[in-house]
Image (spheres, rainbow, N blue to C red):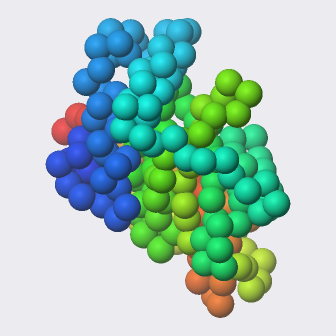
């Protein structure tokens, strides 16, 4: 699976709704403007954002203003709007990540593991000088509270070990999965739906 996921991240393997995500991610990887700096450096993300904005403009990926009347909720990293009866629109500024590339990798991993709530990147928008990715996702209406023990058991069966609270780690893949509380994992008719995930790739992911 690790080899398959590496190919997914590199754009060699397809994933649901992942074509644009992979295209932009590969562009950022190869951009001299950002790649000359290490992700840990203070100004890396700022430089990467400038490169990304140029790509967005060149490829007409700016999304028209979101209808604020359709506002649903927001958290530390994103704002959520109702798109129609079947989808929501989420604006995410990638605040949880050192780079936009890492955020895009998160989307790809989510779409691989949780296809029923896959993100579709529709473009980008900017508010008060803050850049947001605009993603569309199936709308899930919970029918019952989520049993977090069932979440733990489900992830355990798929190789993810609970490390603390709502955070998990897959030692075989060297992937971290965080923030899986009962607002980010919904239950509809007895089925778990992972609607907001935070994936991080560790260095061992790229090693055999």
User: In the picture provided, is 193 more to the left or to the right than 207?
Assistant: right
**Residue 5: where, in percent of width, then height?**
27, 51
User: In the picture provided, is 175 more to the left or to the right than 181?
Assistant: left
Quarter of the picture holding the N terminus: bottom left
Observer-nearest of 24 and 104: 24
**Residue 117: where, in percent of width, then height?**
51, 69
Which residue occupies 29% across, 31% down? 27
Which residue occupies 37% across, 61% down? 17
State how many labels appear: 0
Observer-nearest of 120 and 108: 120
Quarter of the picture holding the C terminus: top left
**Residue 18: where, in percent of width, then height?**
35, 55
Q: Is residue 47 above or below residue 72?
A: above
**Residue 136: where, in percent of width, then height?**
55, 61
User: In the picture provided, is 86 more to the left or to the right than 160?
Assistant: right
Q: Residue furthest bottom?
A: 189
Which residue occupies 42% across, 69% down? 115
Observer-nearest of 8 and 182: 8
Q: Is residue 47 visible?
A: yes
């Amino acid at each position: 699976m690790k080899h398959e996921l590496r190919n997914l991240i590199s754009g060699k393997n397809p994933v649901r709704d992942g074509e644009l995500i992979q295209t932009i991610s590969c562009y950022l990887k190869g951009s001299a403007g950002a790649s000359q700096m290490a992700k840990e450096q203070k100004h890396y993300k700022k430089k990467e954002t400038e490169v990304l904005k140029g790509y967005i403009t060149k490829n007409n990926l700016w999304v028209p203003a979101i209808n604020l009347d359709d506002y649903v909720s927001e958290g530390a990293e994103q704002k959520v709007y109702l798109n129609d009866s079947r989808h929501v629109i989420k604006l995410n500024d990638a605040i949880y990540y050192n780079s936009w590339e890492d955020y895009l990798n998160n989307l790809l991993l989510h779409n691989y593991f949780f296809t029923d709530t896959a993100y579709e990147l529709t473009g980008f928008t900017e508010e008060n000088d803050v850049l947001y990715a605009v993603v569309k996702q199936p709308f899930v209406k919970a029918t019952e509270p989520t049993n977090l023990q069932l979440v733990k058991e489900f992830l355990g069966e798929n190789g993810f070990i609970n490390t603390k609270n709502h955070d998990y780690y897959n030692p075989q893949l060297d992937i971290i999965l965080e923030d899986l509380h009962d607002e980010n994992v919904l239950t509809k008719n007895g089925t778990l739906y992972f609607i907001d995930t935070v994936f991080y790739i560790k260095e061992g992911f790229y090693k055999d």
